[in-house]
Image (cartoon, rainbow, N blue to C red):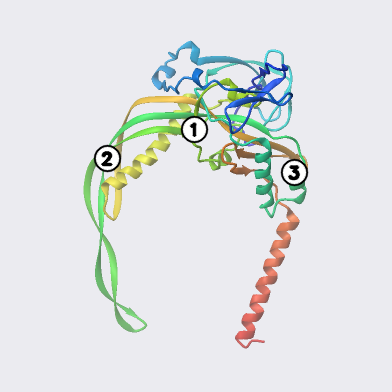
Amino acid sequence: MDAEGPATVSEEHRFPCTECGADMRFEPGGESLVCDHCGATEAIDGAARSRIAELDFEAALEARLPEQEIEETRVSACPNCGAQVELGGATHAAECPFCATPVVTDTGTHRHIKPRAVLPFALDERTARAAMTDWLGSLWFAPNGLKQYARKGRAMNGIYVPYWTFDADTRSAYSGERGTVYYTTVTVMRDGKRVKKRIAKVRWRRVTGRVARFFDDVLVLASRSLPRKYTDALEPWDLAALEPYSPEFLAGFRAEGYAVELPEGYEEARGKMARVIERDVRFDIGGDRQRIHHVDTEVSDVTFKHILLPVWLAAYKYRGETYRFVVNGRTGRVQGERPYSAWKIALAVLIGLALAGIAGYFYGVEQGAF
């Protein structure tokens, strides 16, 4: 596993069907719960959902958030990957969705900030599995056995992955230099002859200035249970479609608790902001070249949200190793780990050598060597 720390994964939220009493689940792509037992549906009450409110960052750092923004859950640690699986009051065993290991050991409670918004699943499991199968089919160097195992393997897990978003006003003062390219002509010797050549030079002029930007929903992954290179590759997310948090959206799914604490998430967000501010400064300096000597940024009115984004996850054990595949629950974009087939790589090398030999032979014929 590429995990760097614990995560918390909640048990499925349960909503009994009013017709037959069976558990209802959220239907991806819609705004209703559906009962797989009797087919009954129940619309999620949009009128009861408030607008998505931001939380004050400084208040959170000083532990001054309202108590209703905090919740406490019972967790159990996965003995294999370290993820912490949240268990309901009557549940004493579960399976880790990240590595398919049984989880039975109760390790205490986890107190954390409640989610403020959720991006509901738009793709069902069948569509996600088809996307994953197509992606595996495009990996020529993956073993055939893995592809076959994935096609007929275990069910995928629908998991809401935690993220932080940050809003902030920034004002930056900078100093640097604007470069203007100009050309001079010189005479050089080339093949025993004097030829003229244009040389590009840069004339630098010192500049100072100010830029300002409001950052809206700077996104930071709050999980350590999945490799960041895969979750980053699932972007972009359509955050404009975020819904105010409602447990009905989680019915039939699980939600991972955040492992990246708020201050650490903010530091990562500041890094993302700094890169955008640098781009703004370069644009403001103008010219053909830019040198930035110093940027002093004042950040104010920082707010944040804890949000949940939808991911379909498959964890397969193949020849003793665990491989994970993640699918964006909105767009179907796929990323994952994969083994390599040694015989396929060897075959590709042999084919490449053969083609190189054939090309070399015909080149020799053209040159009269054969």
The Cα–Cα distance between marks 1 and 3, rounded to whole angstroms, is: 31 Å
Percent from the top left, x then y, of residue 257? 58, 24
Q: Is residue 114 visible?
A: yes
Outermost residue on the top side: it is 67
The Cα–Cα distance between marks 3 and 2, rounded to whole angstroms, is: 55 Å
> Which one is earlier in the sequence, the residue at label 2 or at label 1?
2
> Which of the pair 29/203 is nearer the observer?
29
Residue that appears at 57% across and 37% down: 330
Q: Are marks 2 and 1 in contact (CB under 8 Å)?
A: no
The Cα–Cα distance between marks 2 and 1, rounded to whole angstroms, is: 36 Å
Of the numbered discs in the image, which one, if any, rests on residue 151?
3
The residue under label 1 is which amino acid type? Answer: Ala
Q: Is residue 249 left or right of residue 94?
A: left
Q: Secondary structure at mark 1?
A: helix
> Which of the pair 131/96 is nearer the observer?
131
> Which one is earlier in the sequence, the residue at label 1 or at label 3?
3
Q: Which residue is mark 1?
A: 241
Q: Is residue 7 visible?
A: no
> Which of the pair 38/61 is nearer the observer?
38
Percent from the top left, x then y, of residue 59? 40, 17
- For the C terminus, the quadrant is bottom right
Of the numbered discs in the image, which one, if any, rests on residue 39?
none
Q: Secondary structure at mark 2?
A: strand
Q: Which residue is mark 2?
A: 174
Q: Quadrant of residue 336?
A: top right
Q: Quadrant of residue 12?
A: top right
Residue that appears at 68% across and 18% down: 17
Q: Is residue 253 left or right of residue 244?
A: right
Mark 1 neighbour density, 10 Å: few (under 14) some (14–19) many (20 or more):
few
Percent from the top left, x then y, of residue 1? 66, 36
Mark 3 neighbour density, 10 Å: few (under 14) some (14–19) many (20 or more):
some
Outermost residue on the bottom side: it is 368
